[in-house]
Image: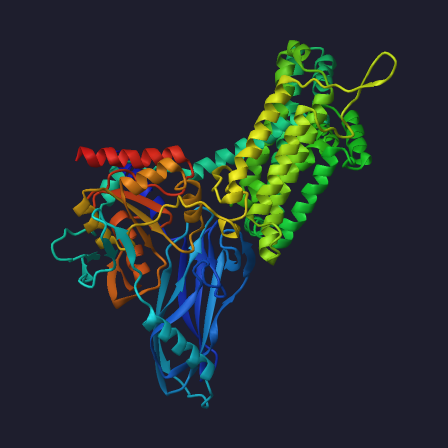
Amino acid sequence: MKKIASLLLLWVMALPLWAQLHEPVSFSVSQVKLSDSEFEIVFTGNIEAGWHVYGTDIAGGGPTPATINFDERKGVELVGKLTARGNVHKAYDNMFGMEVSYMEGTAVFVQKMRITAESYSVKGYLNYGACNDENCMPPSDVEFAFSGTGKPAAAKAATADKAEDKTKAEENVNEVRKEDQQQSADGADTLAVVPDAVDLSVSDGTIASVVAGVSDYWTPVIDELASFGEDASNAANQSWWKIFLLGFLGGLVALLTPCVWPIIPMTVSFFLKRSGDKRKGIRDAATYGVSIVLIYVILGLAVTGIFGASALNALSTNAFFNLFFCLMLLVFAASFFGAFEITLPSSWSNAVDSKAESTTGLLSIFLMAFTLVLVSFSCTGPIIGFLLVEVSTSGGSILAPAIGMFGFALALALPFTLFAMFPTWLKTMPKSGNWMNCVKVTLGFLELAFALKFLSVADLAYGWHILDREAFLSLWIVIFSLLGAYLIGWLRFPHDEDEYDDCGNVVVNHRTSVPRFFMALVSFAFAIYMVPGLWGAPLKAISAFSPPMSTQDFNLYENEVKAQFTDYEAGMEYARQQGKPVMLDFTGYGCVNCRKMELAVWADQKVADIMQNDYVLITLFVDEKTKLPEPVKVTENGQERTLRTVGDKWSYLQRCKFGANAQPFYVLLDNDGKPLNKSYSYDEDVNKYIDFLQTGLRNYKSK
């Protein structure tokens, strides 16, 4: 028993490390002979659910594409380029502003080779990038080495391939190391470069930094970091709660619509009167509520069951899908404004209703719940449609739509059970009236606003440039200003009821209720909040909806946090001289969530002040392609790896020193390279990030 307890304890202690450092993609490589003079190098990767590997045809400035690189190539020549085979998806990526190709589940890359001598040998590596919805792995290598004999093919011109190789070689030779300027206290400029004096050597599987006169900043601190507790962020758990709360909020809104609210007292009274027994009536009403939840959860599971979680995730950046959903939301908005009614065929609800009357027991109650779902579709359909798309394309899991639908159905079903348990509450229910149409019209404005979000994705995909950031914000400002005008009573729609005097004349009601006044106040305030965005203000509250800042034509915003150093050793030495703690930012040019953190969190004034004044910020790009002076071989987890680029070096630093390999990854260090707080990854909670920074400062001062 003690042994079992010890094993369980070790397993629990290992969980945080496993969660931070694992390989979501595993590749195998093989040589496939096509003939005596040709063969293929085949890379086959198994990809964990929720992750994807990028293809080969990705333009610069985007995520890491798959490339094949050769350290040795004797007796062979390339035939064509590295190609991706299998189910390759292509979708528009809103953050990168370009179309990207990727594979999920299984990734296959093939490079065809032609034998030009009786014996041949090839040696090199495949470099690829992998991401999920929250993190990106650093560019990873799959090494290979093959040799053999064959029948030399007839000499064929390979001018194009050789020219391409020459171009790549020239690019590598001409690459120069980046320089960062840091204004020192006396006004002199200090250059932060990768020091030529740094000797990369291997010592027990770690690179030792032997810059003269400084301590070994590469010493692993995995245990020390773990002693502070788990990562300060918890985005995965938050996402589930956000999906549930989004669904629950949608259900509460649906309750207040004309299609649902009037049905509640009728249904509860029916159950109580039919049973004649209050206890049985409560049980029937509870069964009715559970049936509603079950129907909507099945609907959520059916969505991903039919399309698949990965297909829905791909749809989130598909231009045609976003354009279609934009048009659908516009139709729903027009319906909510009173232009027409969207209803399912009455024969459907009549058939289900008659079936419910002819049956008894649980089946009868379930069919009654199904009738409610059909009858209320004109009000709940737009809410459900928007909710399903949002959670399906952002959850990254087959459970996301089911969780969203569970929250929606729970809010929708709860009143039926509560009013059955406490029937006297029915007397306190607000009577049906014009306020329910106000809810519908308000939803119409929100549908109209969210339609622009989907139109923005299509606009970026096709390069129409009709909905750049300024245009998008202008339309949202107008929409929410009109919503405020409607709520205050200045704007009316066809279904808004008129009031009549004793003679039958229409009386315009200029009185505004207190709830509508406060809602109008919020809507006007939100519209005014967005106005500075026309001149480049980041507008963190809508950063997930508006087009990227790169589409902004006129930008006066300059409060951007910039790294002081992009070299680890140089930054650490500067921090030691200045007596400041260090913030390490492991990022990537192709890291989407890194950009989100910089826009939504770093743009906060308090965060920016702390980072710029109290820390030395060192940003390390794990996909930096600048070549190291010489490739360095290291032993990691019993396997030999080769570090060829500066990005490889920083990626290895993150793994060997901190036991993590996902970006974004933030860690605070003292001047000896020891952690000052738990690490932090992707979580856009500004207050939590501020606490993360301030805790590190307190621990640094206490040392």
Residue 411 visible? The answer is yes
Residue 292 visible? The answer is no
The answer to which image quadrant residue 66 occupies is: bottom left
Residue at left offset 55%, top offset 55%: 92
Nearest the camera: 646 or 283? 646
Q: Quadrant of the N terminus?
A: top left
Q: Position of residue 340 (x, y in %)?
A: 79, 36
Q: Position of residue 684 (x, y in %)?
A: 43, 39
Tell me: residue 119, above or below residue 93. Answer: below
Q: Position of residue 419 (x, y in %)?
A: 64, 15
Residue at left offset 61%, top offset 53%: 459
Work out which residue is located at the far bottom of the displayed protein and give it: 154
- Residue 601 horizontal side relative to residue 496, left or right: left
Nearest the camera: 518 or 646? 518
Q: Position of residue 230 (x, y in %)?
A: 32, 37
The answer to which image quadrant residue 566 occupies is: bottom left
Work out which residue is located at the far right of the displayed protein and give it: 503
Work out which residue is located at the far front of the displayed protein and give it: 187
Nearest the camera: 655 or 474? 474
Residue at left offset 35%, top offset 35%: 690
Circle count: 0
- Residue 492 horizontal side relative to residue 669, left or right: right
Q: Give the colour scheme of this rendering.
A: rainbow
Q: Quadrant of the C terminus?
A: top left
Residue at left offset 32%, top offset 59%: 647
Nearest the camera: 491 or 279? 491
